[in-house]
């Protein structure tokens, strides 16, 4: 009889003698006679369909598959499906149970961001779901990633819509925990461009550099997508015999002669000075703008 044995297969990465493996583990119910298990490894093809890459028959509650860059490589989404059989017979005892998908490679968390042109910093984590193999010479167990930005909506090349706190990050090898074998964190900020250019989409790309291991050499991670919400730019004015309109729309006049601080940011090195001179003559005390300096 086909029954649900709650095998609950799960995929975890393993580093065995300097080689990267994926291990499918599952529960082993107590049964007499003991059971044997068929484990089918599969991955998503480029068309989105599952294709079988390995089939194992085992008496143990686990199965391994090597990431050998041939039938399994970085960037693959992998599954393992387990079915229990009566030992020494072909009698199928359980329904097939499939694991959750496991993406082998580098991931951004979150995979997409929604931010605004308000100067706020947003955390972005880059992690590797597979162990990093140490080189034969030296003890530097890390992957160095070069980060780049592509503005998908920009009509001005060289003017990115976002800014990163780091141009390179090092993923240092750590014991596997919470779906991560190595991780680094940086911040993303929207560039305040003082232009009403609508919402724009940018991509953050991470590419391994200086790595000779065949597993990583030709690998490119999936991009992180960042949508920047355009915010209206504030304006303030000082004109004629100076009429002042502030950022929040308050209006007043000033008739003083001299040099004054018109505007100053409390968070960045930005300020505007204005110079006013006497332009009213003997009949009235009136001042007019005659100079401006901005940092």
Image (cartoon, rainbow, N blue to C red):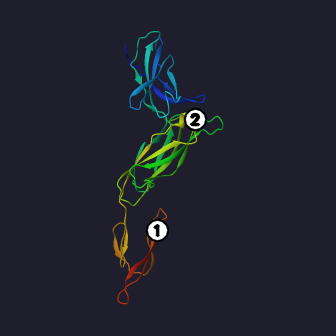
Q: Say the numbered circle drawn on residue 271.
A: 1
Image: 31 above or below 54 = above
User: Mark 2 sits on what residue?
Assistant: 213
- Disc 2: CA contacts within 10 A as few (<14), some (14-19) or many (>=20): few
SS of the residue at dot 1?
strand
Q: Where's the N terminus, which quadrant?
A: top left
Residue 60 placement, left or right of 141: left
| Image coords of residue 244 (percent x, y) | 36, 73
Disc 2 and disc 1: Cα gap in Å? Answer: 51 Å
Of residue 48 and residue 178, the one placed in the foreground of this image is: 48
Total numbered badges shown on the rendered structure: 2
| Image coords of residue 107 (percent x, y) | 47, 39
Name the quadrant containing residue 237.
bottom left
Image: 193 above or below 144 = below
Image: 15 above or below 253 = above
| Image coords of residue 83 (percent x, y) | 43, 19
Q: Residue at x 38, y 78 (%)?
A: 254
Q: Which residue is drawn at 46% across and 49% down?
A: 149
SS of the residue at dot 2?
loop
Is there any visible trace of residue 205 in the rendered image? yes
Q: Residue furthest right?
A: 137
Is there any visible trace of residue 29 in the rendered image? no
Of residue 24 and residue 164, the one placed in the foreground of this image is: 164
| Image coords of residue 74 (percent x, y) | 50, 34
- Disc 1: CA contacts within 10 A as few (<14), some (14-19) or many (>=20): some
Residue 141 placement, left or right of 265: right
Q: Which residue is drawn at 49% across and 29% down?
A: 72
Q: Residue furthest top?
A: 88
Q: Say the numbered circle drawn on residue 279.
A: none
Q: Which residue lies furthest to the bottom in this view?
A: 282
Of discs 2 and 1, which sits in the foreground? 2
């Amino acid at each position: 009889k086909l029954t649900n044995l709650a095998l609950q297969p799960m995929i975890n990465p393993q580093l065995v003698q300097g080689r990267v493996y994926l291990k499918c583990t599952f529960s082993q119910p107590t049964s007499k006679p003991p059971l044997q298990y068929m484990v089918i490894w599969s991955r998503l093809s480029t068309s989105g369909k599952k294709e079988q890459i390995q089939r194992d028959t085992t008496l143990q509650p686990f199965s391994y598959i090597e990431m050998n860059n041939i039938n399994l490589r970085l960037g693959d989404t992998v599954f393992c499906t387990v079915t229990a059989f009566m030992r020494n017979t072909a009698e199928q005892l359980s329904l097939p149970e499939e694991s959750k998908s496991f993406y082998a490679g580098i991931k951004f968390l979150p995979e997409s961001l929604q931010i605004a042109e308000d100067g706020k910093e947003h955390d972005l984590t880059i992690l590797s779901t597979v162990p990093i193999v140490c080189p034969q010479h030296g003890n530097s167990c890390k992957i160095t990633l070069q980060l780049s930005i592509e503005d998908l909506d920009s009509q001005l090349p060289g003017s990115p819509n976002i800014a990163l706190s780091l141009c390179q990050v090092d993923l240092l090898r750590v014991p596997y925990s919470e779906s991560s074998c190595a991780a680094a964190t940086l911040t993303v900020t929207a560039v305040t461009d003082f232009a009403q250019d609508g919402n724009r989409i940018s991509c953050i790309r991470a590419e391994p550099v200086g790595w000779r291991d065949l597993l990583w050499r030709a690998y490119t991670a999936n991009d992180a997508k960042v949508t920047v919400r355009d915010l209206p730019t504030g304006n303030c004015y000082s004109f004629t015999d100076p009429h002042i309109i502030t950022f929040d729309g308050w209006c007043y006049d000033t008739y003083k002669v001299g040099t004054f601080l018109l505007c100053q940011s409390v968070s960045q090195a930005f300020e505007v000075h204005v110079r006013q001179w006497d332009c009213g003559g003997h009949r009235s005390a009136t001042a007019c703008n005659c100079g401006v300096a901005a940092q």
